[in-house]
Image (spheres, rainbow, N blue to C red):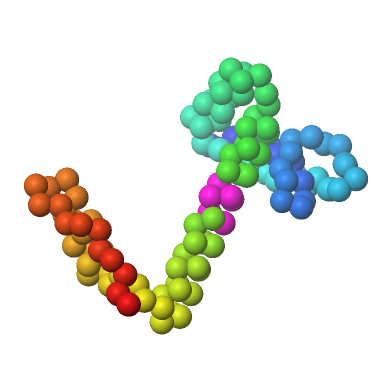
Amino acid sequence: MASVFMVTVASGGRLTSSGADSDMTKPISLNVRLMPEINEKLEALARNRGCSKSDLASQAIVSFVDDQAWQVREIELGLAEARSGKPGVPHEEVAAWVQSWDTDHELPRPKSKK
């Protein structure tokens, strides 16, 4: 059975475990279901760091969302560049180069086709 605890999430892109409203944000609550072993690890980590489980969960959510947003943004930029018709490196050349890593015959980094 999963454990449930509350995480307070402030709107405006900032996460917090504080229950107090600020001038800029209005916190909302989020229920999170955790497997017991994750809950135990989270409790131990919170004790060791001297903070609450909500604080740690908020930090983890911020980190995950930021990482995912960066990845999506970079993929979108790469796709837009590929669709633009600008010169680039053919996939086959990049694949061959990567496959040559850690071999006795590593290929040089492929150059953009102009």
- Left or right: 2 in relation to 103: right
Residue at 70% x, 39% y is: 7
Question: What kind of secondary structure does the magenta stretch mostly adopt?
Answer: helix
Residue at 49% x, 61% y is: 74
Residue furthest to the right: 23
User: Residue 100 location in percent, x, y?
Assistant: 16, 54
Residue at 71% x, 51% y is: 13
Residue furthest to the front: 114
Query: Please, is residue 70 above or below residue 49 in the view?
Result: below
Residue furthest to the left: 104
The quadrant in which residue 45 appears is top right
- Left or right: 1 in relation to 32: left
- Left or right: 38 in relation to 52: left
**Magenta residues?**
64-69
User: Residue 18 location in percent, x, y?
Assistant: 79, 35
Query: Please, is residue 2 above or below residue 104 in the view?
Result: above
- Left or right: 22 in relation to 49: right
Residue 19 colored in magenta in the image: no
Does residue 4 appear in the picture of this structure?
no
User: Residue 28 location in percent, x, y?
Assistant: 78, 47
Q: Which quadrant: the C terminus?
A: bottom left
Query: Please, is residue 41 above or below residue 48 in the view?
Result: below
Q: Quick one: 83 or 38, which is closer to the camera?
A: 83
